[in-house]
């Protein structure tokens, strides 16, 4: 029979008490906690209520101390003698206000674990109910896990000097490369001059009528990045199979007409050119997924696994 104690959700009462006490002792601590924590990150209802009161005070521009917190709490509900004693003793439970970041990290970690437990329970219920197809449940499960992983962003508010330093670093790297490109070269000079290369966080849509060469264009970029720059590239193909994509990449790399490649009507030289194109493509960082029915969540999951495997 499992140990009942081991089934108590993860939490740290001491860390929560230290945060709440630190918030009443230091404005810096109060602002740090509000920036990085949510009310739901606290385990007990009492601590959530205390944090909510302090949050309200900061939002109104009022100081956070024992007097203001008690007053704010009693605006909604009269405190008992025991509750009043608990609040007044919180500041005495703080080992050091200088460790506020460590206390916050402990509470965030425990909160994340609790949300993961809730997410797993929700996923388990979906599996037992069997009201949806397995692939739909997998997609929804991925969405649930992703929402848990998002949490509350840290250090999103930065001084301009930080952004300037990051920009200067990128400019210096572009200057040293002598190409004037901040991102990864696509292999198409005109596009690189316009976009300054392929950069992190960008979404580039290639649009056009059927038969205009969209796929060939995208594969050429993948080849340039994966073969020449040795970067990891993933191609998700919802229409073409992996052997068809492989054939397109080979014909493009060997500069051989794709129609001749498909028909097998090749000269001895063209056969040799295709053979020579095999090695650099095989040694590249290009991966292909030809799953016809795949959602954005599955793509994200596969990319995250690949990133862990390759480190890129």
Image (cartoon, rainbow, N blue to C red):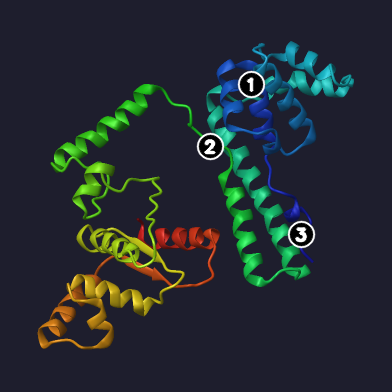
Q: Residue furthest left?
A: 269
Q: Earlier in the sequence, mark 3 or mark 2?
A: 3
Residue that label 1 marks: 23
Q: Position of residue 53 (x, y in %)?
A: 74, 22
Q: Nearer the viewer, mark 1 or mark 2?
A: 2
Residue that label 2 marks: 153
Disc on res. 282: none
Q: Position of residue 162 (x, y in %)?
A: 36, 27
How many other residues sit within 10 Å of disc 3, few (<14), some (14-19) or many (≥20)?
Answer: few
> Measuring 80% from the left and 19% from the top, which residue is drawn there?
73
Secondary element under disc 3, as helix, strand or loop, is: loop
How many other residues sit within 10 Å of disc 2, few (<14), some (14-19) or many (≥20)?
Answer: few
Q: Earlier in the sequence, mark 1 or mark 2?
A: 1
Secondary element under disc 2, as helix, strand or loop, is: loop
Secondary element under disc 1, as helix, strand or loop, is: helix
Residue 122's place in the image compared with 183, above or below, is below
Q: Mark 3 touching mark 2, by CB under 8 A?
A: no
Q: Nearer the viewer, mark 3 or mark 1?
A: 1
How many other residues sit within 10 Å of disc 1, few (<14), some (14-19) or many (≥20)?
Answer: many
> Measuring 64% from the left and 60% from the top, which residue is drawn there?
140
Q: Is residue 3 left or right of residue 260?
A: right
């Amino acid at each position: 029979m499992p140990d009942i104690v081991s089934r108590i959700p993860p939490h740290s009462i001491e860390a929560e008490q230290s945060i709440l006490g630190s918030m009443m002792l230091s404005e810096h601590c109060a602002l740090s906690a509000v920036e990085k924590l949510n009310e739901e990150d606290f385990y007990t209802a009492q601590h959530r209520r205390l944090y909510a009161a302090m949050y309200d005070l900061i939002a109104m521009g009022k100081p956070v101390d024992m007097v203001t917190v008690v007053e704010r709490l009693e605006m909604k509900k009269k405190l008992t003698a025991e509750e009043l004693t608990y609040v007044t003793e919180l500041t005495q439970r703080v080992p050091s206000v200088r460790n506020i970041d460590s206390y916050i990290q402990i509470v965030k970690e425990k909160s994340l674990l609790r949300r993961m437990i809730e997410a797993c329970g929700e996923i388990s219920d979906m599996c037992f109910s069997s009201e949806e197809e397995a692939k739909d449940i997998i997609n929804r499960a991925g969405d649930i896990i992703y929402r848990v992983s998002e949490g509350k962003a840290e250090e999103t508010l930065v001084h301009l000097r930080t952004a300037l330093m990051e920009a200067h670093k990128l400019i210096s790297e572009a200057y040293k490369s002598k190409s004037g490109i901040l991102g990864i070269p696509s292999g198409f000079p005109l596009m690189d001059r316009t976009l300054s290369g392929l950069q992190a966080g960008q979404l580039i849509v290639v649009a056009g009528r059927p038969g205009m060469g969209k796929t060939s264009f995208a594969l050429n970029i993948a080849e340039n990045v994966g073969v020449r720059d040795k970067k990891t590239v993933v191609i998700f193909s919802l229409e073409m199979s992996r052997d068809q994509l492989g054939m397109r990449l080979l014909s493009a790399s060997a500069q051989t007409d794709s129609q001749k490649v498909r028909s097998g009507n090749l000269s001895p030289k063209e056969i040799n050119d295709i053979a020579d194109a095999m090695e650099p493509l095989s040694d590249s960082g290009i991966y292909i997924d030809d799953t016809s029915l795949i959602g954005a969540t599955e793509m994200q999951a596969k990319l995250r696994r690949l990133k862990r495997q390759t480190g890129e």
